[in-house]
């Protein structure tokens, strides 16, 4: 059952991201947080994981270490540790896109197992959003991302590989972890783009106007 801490997290997340919208849209950012939380709960997450899902982008997007400290104080170290594990390493700040993504991929190899469900849910919802927008506007969708076509495809392939390997390893050790599954169209996300050649490196990625996920 979900208790008062979850209710408080809903209000906190809504207030924290009040002025933020999804990339290049009018969709309130809280919609993403609710979607990630929903996936976490639908795949066996408990209350601390659900609370962390609501708060997972707080430090990264709204205040850095100060926000993470506030989350720990309000919601406890169990939630704070999960939120920290879900964030790109904060010390990288606004460094180059490729550097940040490679650092996060390295970070994924050591994050606590309980954080993997939240991270997978976050990336699944982002991928679904890309697929949905791609169906409407085509390859133009990649102009929204710092990685461009090549970099975005590279990053999501790497996420699938690293997360898949971690989850399989944890499962072999007897830890039950259900991962959100992409619908059939989204499983083709790595092939998105109009007749773009596949690449194993983001080096050729085109720059973009704002920070990509």
Image (cartoon, helix red, strand yellow):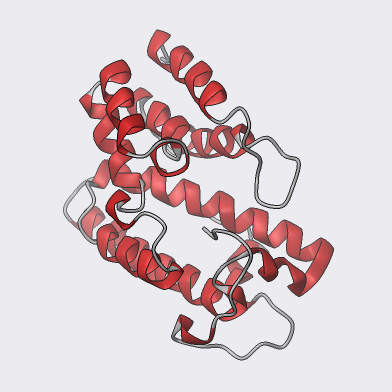
| Residue 137 % position (x, y) | 82, 65
Taking 158 as reference, is 108 left or right? Answer: left
The quarter of the picture where the N terminus appears is: top left
35 shown above or below 88:
above
Q: Quadrant of residue 26?
A: top right
| Residue 178 % position (x, y) | 39, 46
The one nearer the camera, 16 or 134, is 16
- Residue at 55 percent across and 60 percent down: it is 212
Q: Quadrant of residue 35?
A: top right
88 shown above or below 2:
below
- Residue at 19 percent across and 49 percent down: it is 174
The one nearer the camera, 85 or 91, is 91
| Residue 42 % position (x, y) | 50, 35
32 shown above or below 126:
above
- Residue at 52 percent across and 16 percent down: it is 11
| Residue 112 % position (x, y) | 22, 46
**Could you tell me how many numbered marks the image carries?**
0
Outermost residue, top direction? 4
Taking 133 as reference, is 78 left or right? Answer: left
Q: Report if residue 178 is visible in the image.
A: no
67 shown above or below 109:
above
Outermost residue, right direction? 136
Q: Quadrant of residue 132?
A: bottom right
The one nearer the camera, 129 or 169, is 129
Q: Report if residue 161 is visible in the image.
A: yes
Outermost residue, left direction? 173
């Amino acid at each position: 059952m979900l208790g008062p801490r979850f209710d408080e997290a809903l209000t906190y997340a809504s207030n924290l991201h009040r002025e933020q919208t999804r990339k290049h849209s009018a969709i309130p950012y809280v919609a993403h947080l609710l979607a990630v939380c929903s996936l976490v709960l639908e795949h066996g997450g408990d209350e601390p994981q659900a609370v962390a899902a609501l708060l997972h982008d707080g430090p990264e997007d709204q205040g850095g270490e100060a926000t993470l400290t506030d989350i720990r104080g309000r919601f406890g170290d169990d939630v704070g540790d999960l939120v920290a594990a879900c964030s790109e390493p904060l010390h990288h700040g606004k460094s180059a896109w490729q550097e940040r993504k490679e650092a996060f991929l390295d970070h994924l190899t050591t994050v606590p197992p309980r954080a993997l469900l939240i991270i997978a849910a976050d990336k699944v919802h982002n991928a679904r959003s890309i697929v949905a927008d791609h169906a409407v506007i085509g390859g133009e969708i990649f102009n929204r991302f710092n990685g461009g076509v090549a970099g975005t495809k590279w990053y999501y392939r790497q996420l699938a590989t690293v997360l898949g390997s971690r989850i399989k390893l944890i499962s072999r050790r007897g830890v039950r972890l259900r991962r959100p599954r992409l619908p059939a169209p989204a499983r083709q996300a790595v092939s998105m783009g109009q007749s773009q050649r596949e690449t194993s490196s983001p080096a050729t990625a085109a720059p973009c106007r704002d920070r990509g996920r």
